[in-house]
């Protein structure tokens, strides 16, 4: 699984556009911070390997947008990075709260989904 979170409070739901494909994600939205402070945001990511859009989930709340994306192949190892490109993208970082250690056997068992 890939857990992707966009930390952006104030996303206006009617402006949210995202397109999750087997190979990447395109995201656009407008976020409103104050009455007169609206900003448009957008990005595109080409994933390291294929994913399964039909088995992925999304959630929008007041703090941002998050997705749980199923990898295309059942893999026992981590992707070395999120993207195909082998360079650091400044606005992408690892959320270590979601990473389980390689030696942790519970990472291969189903965990209950918490909402």
Image (cartoon, rainbow, N blue to C red):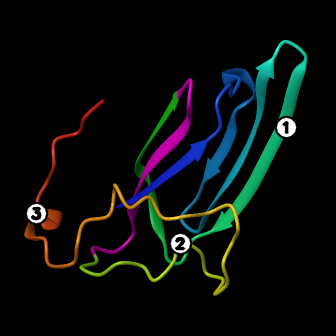
User: What is the residue that sits farthest to the top in this orientation?
Assistant: 35
Instruction: Say whether residue 21 is magenta.
Output: no
Residue drawn at x 56%, y 30% is 63
* Residue 82: assigned label: 2
Of the two numbered discs 1 and 2 on the same chain, state the one appearing first in sequence: 1
65 vs 99, nearest the viewer: 99
Q: Determine the main secondary structure of the stretch shown in magenta.
A: strand
Relative vertical location of residue 73 with respect to residue 19 in this rendering, above or below: below
Looking at the picture, how far across and down is residue 33, in whole percent?
A: 77, 23
25 vs 114, nearest the viewer: 114
Relative vertical location of residue 34 with respect to residue 102 in this rendering, above or below: above
Residue bounds of the magenta highlight: 61-74
Q: Real-space Cα distance between discs 3 and 2?
A: 22 Å
Relative vertical location of residue 88 with respect to residue 69 in this rendering, above or below: below
Q: Which residue is mark 1?
A: 40
Q: Which residue is mark 3?
A: 106
């Amino acid at each position: 699984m890939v857990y992707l979170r966009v930390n952006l409070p104030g996303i206006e739901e009617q402006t949210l556009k995202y397109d999750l494909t087997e190979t990447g994600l395109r995201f656009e939205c407008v976020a409103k911070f104050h009455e007169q402070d609206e900003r448009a945001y957008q990005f595109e990511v080409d994933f390291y390997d294929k994913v399964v859009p039909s088995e992925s989930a999304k959630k929008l709340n007041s703090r941002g947008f998050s997705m749980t994306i199923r990898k295309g192949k059942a893999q026992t190892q981590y992707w070395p990075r999120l993207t195909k490109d082998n360079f650091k993208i400044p606005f992408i970082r690892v959320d270590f709260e979601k990473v389980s250690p390689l030696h942790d056997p519970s990472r291969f068992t189903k965990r209950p989904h918490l909402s």
